[in-house]
C-alpha cells in the first residue's frame, strides 16, 4: 500500500506554498485564499506556507487554515525551511504558484524525500513576459528552470487555456496539465450590482500603473468620446506621473481622476457603467469578473491572451484591437449604446466562485491520490 493511502476518517493534508511578504492580497494570493476557503474542511487539512513575514493577518481566511510564515526574504533563503516544513507536516499534496516558487517546490520535494503529490499552478503567459518584461538573461534563466523542473510535477493547473497552450509551447516535455479558471468571488459574499447607483458615462480601469497595462490607451480613447464620459483610474505604479502628465497635455483634467490603490474597488465598480481592461497581456484578468459581477459592461483588449477566453470571445463583453485608441473608443460607444443583458452577465460572473474552484481542485487532488494507491 502506498504511503499516500488515507484511512476513511483521516483528513488529506494540503500544503499551499506562496512566495511573498507584507500583505497577502491581490493576484495569486487572492486565488489561493478563495481556494483555501472553499475547501471541504471535513475532508482536507490545509496549510498555507509563506516565504516571508506578514504585516497583518490574512483577510477573510478560514480559521481552519494554518498559516506558517518562514520569515525569509527571497526564495533561496526559504528553500531549506520549506524542506523542513514538508518533512514536519508530511502533506499528501503540495500546491505552489508562479515560476520561481514552482521550481523551488519541485526541488524541495526531492530533497525532503516525501512521497507527496506536487501540483504546480501557472497564472500568467510566458511569451509576452519573455519579450517585454524580463531581460534576456533573466528570461533565459527562468525558462531553463521551468523546462528542467515542471516535467517532474504530478500535474500543472493553468488559470486559462491561453496560459496552458503557451506553457506547452515553451515546455514540450510537459505532459499532465489542465485548466481551472480563477475563483474571483466568494459564494457567501457575492457583490450587490446595485443598478440604481450606476452613473452614466462613468468608466473605470484598475491595475498597477506600468507600461504593459496600457492605461494611456484608455486616456487617449477618452479624448475621442463625448464630454459626458469620464474616467476613474484605480491603482498606482511607476507610470502614474507620466499618465497624469498625459491627462494634462490632452486637457482632460476635469474628466479623469486617479484614486491610487483602494481597499474596496467594488465600491467604484458598482457606480461605473463601463469597465476597461486594456493590458497587452493577462493570464486571466480577475477584474473582468469582479466588475461584471457589479453590473458593469466590460471592454477588453482582444489580443491580450486570456481576456477573450474569459469573456466568451465577445459573448459577455466587448473586445477591441489593442494598441488603437480609436478602436477602443468605438468599443466603449458600443458598450454604452448596446449593452449586454445584465441578467446574462450576472449569471456568468456568478460561475467564478470559491466553491466552484474548490470542487475542481478537490477532484484533481482525489485523482492524484487515487493514482498513488496503484503505484
Image (cartoon, rainbow, N blue to C red):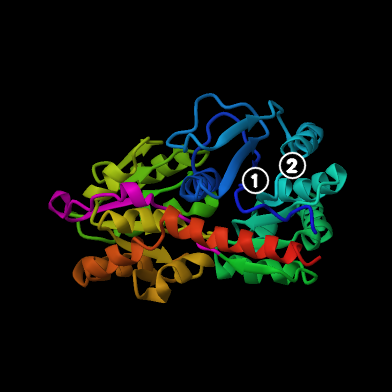
N-terminal of the pair, mark 2 or mark 1, is 1
> Tag 1: Cα neighbours inside 10 Å, few (<14), some, or many (≥20)?
some
| In this rendering, position of residue 272 left or right of residue 282 | left
Please tell me which residue is depicted at 50% across the width and 70% down the height of the picture.
303
Query: Which quarter of the rendering shows the C terminus?
Result: bottom right
Q: Residue furthest left?
A: 196
Q: In the displayed structure, would residue 10 be above or below residue 277?
A: above
The span shown in magenta is 180-204
| CA–CA distance in space, label 2 to label 1 | 8 Å
Q: Quadrant of residue 362?
A: bottom right
Magenta residue check for 181: yes
Mark 1 falls on what kind of element?
A: strand
Report which residue position mark 1 lands on: 13
Q: Position of residue 226 (x, y in %)?
A: 20, 59
Tell me the element at label 2: loop
Q: Label 2 belongs to which residue?
A: 90
Quadrant position of the N terminus in the picture: bottom right
Between 67 and 222, the residue placed more toward the observer is 67
Does the CB distance between marks 2 and 1 fall below 8 Å? yes
Q: Position of residue 8 (x, y in %)?
A: 62, 53
Relative to 190, 27 lies left or right: right
Task: Determine the residue positioned at 63% across, 59% down.
Answer: 365
Q: 43 or 254, which lies in front?
A: 43
Numbered badge on residue 108: none
The prevailing secondary structure element of the residues shown in magenta is: loop
Q: Residue furthest front?
A: 8
Amino acid at each position: 500500500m502506498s504511503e499516500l493511502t488515507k484511512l476513511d476518517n483521516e483528513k488529506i493534508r494540503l500544503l499551499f506554498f506562496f512566495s511573498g511578504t507584507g500583505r497577502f492580497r491581490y493576484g495569486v494570493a487572492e486565488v489561493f485564499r478563495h481556494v483555501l476557503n472553499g475547501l471541504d474542511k471535513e475532508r482536507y487539512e490545509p496549510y498555507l506556507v509563506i516565504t516571508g513575514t506578514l504585516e497583518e493577518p490574512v483577510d477573510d481566511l478560514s480559521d481552519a487554515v494554518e498559516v506558517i510564515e518562514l520569515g525569509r526574504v527571497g526564495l533561496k533563503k526559504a528553500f531549506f525551511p520549506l524542506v523542513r516544513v514538508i518533512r514536519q507536516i508530511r502533506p499528501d499534496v503540495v500546491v505552489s504558484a508562479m515560476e520561481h516558487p514552482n521550481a523551488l517546490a519541485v526541488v524541495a520535494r526531492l530533497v525532503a524525500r516525501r512521497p507527496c503529490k506536487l501540483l504546480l499552478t501557472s497564472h500568467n503567459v510566458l511569451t509576452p513576459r519573455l519579450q517585454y518584461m524580463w531581460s534576456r538573461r533573466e528570461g533565459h534563466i527562468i525558462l531553463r528552470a521551468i523546462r528542467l523542473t515542471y516535467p517532474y510535477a504530478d500535474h500543472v493547473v493553468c488559470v486559462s487555456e491561453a496560459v496552458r497552450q503557451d506553457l506547452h509551447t515553451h515546455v514540450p516535455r510537459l505532459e499532465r496539465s489542465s485548466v481551472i479558471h480563477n475563483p474571483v468571488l466568494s459564494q457567501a459574499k457575492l457583490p450587490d450590482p446595485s443598478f440604481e447607483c450606476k452613473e452614466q458615462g462613468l468608466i473605470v480601469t484598475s491595475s498597477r500603473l506600468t507600461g504593459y497595462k496600457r492605461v494611456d490607451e484608455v486616456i487617449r480613447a477618452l479624448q475621442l468620446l463625448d464630454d459626458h464620459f469620464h474616467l476613474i483610474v484605480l491603482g498606482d505604479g511607476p507610470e502614474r506621473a507620466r499618465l497624469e502628465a498625459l491627462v494634462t497635455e490632452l486637457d482632460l483634467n476635469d474628466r479623469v481622476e486617479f484614486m491610487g490603490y483602494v481597499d474596496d474597488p467594488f465600491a467604484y465598480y458598482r457606480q461605473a457603467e463601463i469597465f476597461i481592461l486594456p493590458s497587452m497581456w493577462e493570464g486571466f484578468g480577475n477584474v473582468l469578473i469582479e466588475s461584471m459581477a457589479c453590473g458593469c459592461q466590460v471592454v477588453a483588449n482582444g489580443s491580450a491572451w486570456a481576456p477573450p477566453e474569459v469573456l466568451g470571445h465577445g459573448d459577455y463583453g466587448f473586445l477591441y484591437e489593442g494598441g488603437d485608441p480609436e478602436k477602443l473608443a468605438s468599443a466603449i460607444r458600443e458598450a454604452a449604446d448596446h449593452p449586454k443583458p445584465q441578467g446574462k452577465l450576472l449569471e456568468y460572473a456568478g460561475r467564478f466562485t470559491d466553491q466552484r474552484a474548490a470542487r475542481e481542485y478537490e477532484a484533481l487532488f482525489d485523482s492524484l491520490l487515487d493514482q498513488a494507491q496503484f503505484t
